[in-house]
Amino acid sequence: MADETKKPYSSLDAKPNADSLIKPGELVDLVEVTPLTLNDRRIYNMMLEHAWEEIDKPVVHHVSKATLRGSHNSNDRIGDSVERLMRAIVKVSVLVDGEPAIERVQLLGGNIELEQPDGMLYYEIPRALRKIIKNSTVFARLQKEVMFALSSKYALTLYEMVQKRGNLRFKSSEKFKLEELRGILGVPKGKLTTWSNLQLRALAPAVEEVNALSDYNVSMTPYKEGRRVAGVVMEWTRKDAAGQSAVDREIEFSKVGRKARMEGRVEAVVEQAQIKPRPAWLERAGESLRTETYETAKLRFPGYDIYHAESEWRAWSKDKEAPRDPDKAYLAFFRNFAKSNPL
């Protein structure tokens, strides 16, 4: 009789794409013995992405410094981050012979940085960490636009925590003790020691940003043991289509004025895109997409005819299986269309 035992899904089976990268769950809920900065975390996520195809193998990976640098003009921050990542020791929750355990590992092994500004960085993933990643079965899919839009390491960590848990079918909340949460967030020892400071300086701003820029609404509600706050209950729900469209528009806006927009104190800094009526000839091709989708397309691809792109998309997808989310499928097609047809 054939073996019907189903192979457990591995994090390595998940694949990054142009918009998102994969981070093993064990590297989301880790505790930093050596606190890292927001830039350190972003750079490390990009290094994981570029190593992903062979991340469980004892090979040397490489990535261009321009990729890690992003919009920053100097390579100094890359070198500083790499050195902090090499010194970083983290505590990861693992199972050893079925028993829960804590494993202490380094995040980054030896590396070589070519000196020219547009040179490559060659690096290794430590053996112990490769084993953890190879055995991982839970992961977070991180949208790169969101990762670079978030403005604090606490917001980025909270975003990763939610992305790791968002697709769980029968779970939408989780309890964290305060010390556990401080460790995951990477709060330096001796900092934000009271609940009020942790809430004011770390949690509240992080929740606000994640709610404004991610596909989920998240809340962090304190609970008490006796008279003192002992921990928080994190709850998350996926946004509806209108909420996701609002996120798309906010990410397209300048960071200038974002805090005021999140707090509802001012109107959006960027005026809403002016959308012409959908031409009658396109009505025969299919139902109209959401107004928010056309607005997002107008903001993302200025200068392009959004309805011509829709016509091209509908012609391209005519004989293909209908997409589960036509609005997202259209925007994904538009991105490739714009790359192939530069203005």
Image (cartoon, helix red, strand yellow):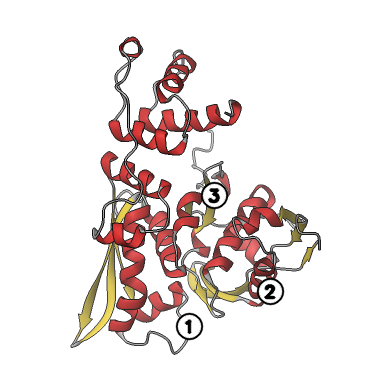
Cα distance between the residues tagged 1 and 3: 27 Å
- The residue nearer to you, when weighing 96 against 105, is 105
In the picture of the structure, the residue carrying the numbered disc 2 is 83
The residue located at (72%, 53%) in the rendering is 64
Q: Is residue 125 above or below residue 273?
A: below
Q: Is residue 324 visible?
A: no
Tell me which amino acid carries mark 3.
Answer: Leu
Q: Amino acid at mark 2?
A: Glu
| Residue at mark 2 to residue at mark 3: CA–CA distance | 23 Å
- Tally the marks: 3
Q: Residue at x 31, y 50 (%)?
A: 268
Circle 1/circle 3 CB separation < 8 Å: no
Instruction: Name the residue rendered at 44%, 90% in the picture.
Output: 190
Q: Report x, y in % for residue 177.
A: 33, 77
How packed mark 1 is, by other alpha carbons closer than 10 Å (few <14, some 14-19, many 20 or more), is: some
Instruction: Identify the mark at residue 21; answer none if there is no mark.
Output: 3
Q: Can you give x and y, in whole percent of width and height, for residue 49 in the image? A: 61, 52
Q: Nearer the viewer, residue 54 or 266?
A: 266
Which is nearer the N-term, disc 1 or disc 3?
Answer: 3
Category of crowding for the residue at label 2, using alpha-carbon neighbours closer than 10 angstroms: few (below 14), some (14–19), many (at least 20): some
Res 88 quadrant in image: bottom right
Q: Position of residue 280 (x, y in %)?
A: 30, 12
Q: What is the three-letter code of the residue carrying label 1?
A: Pro
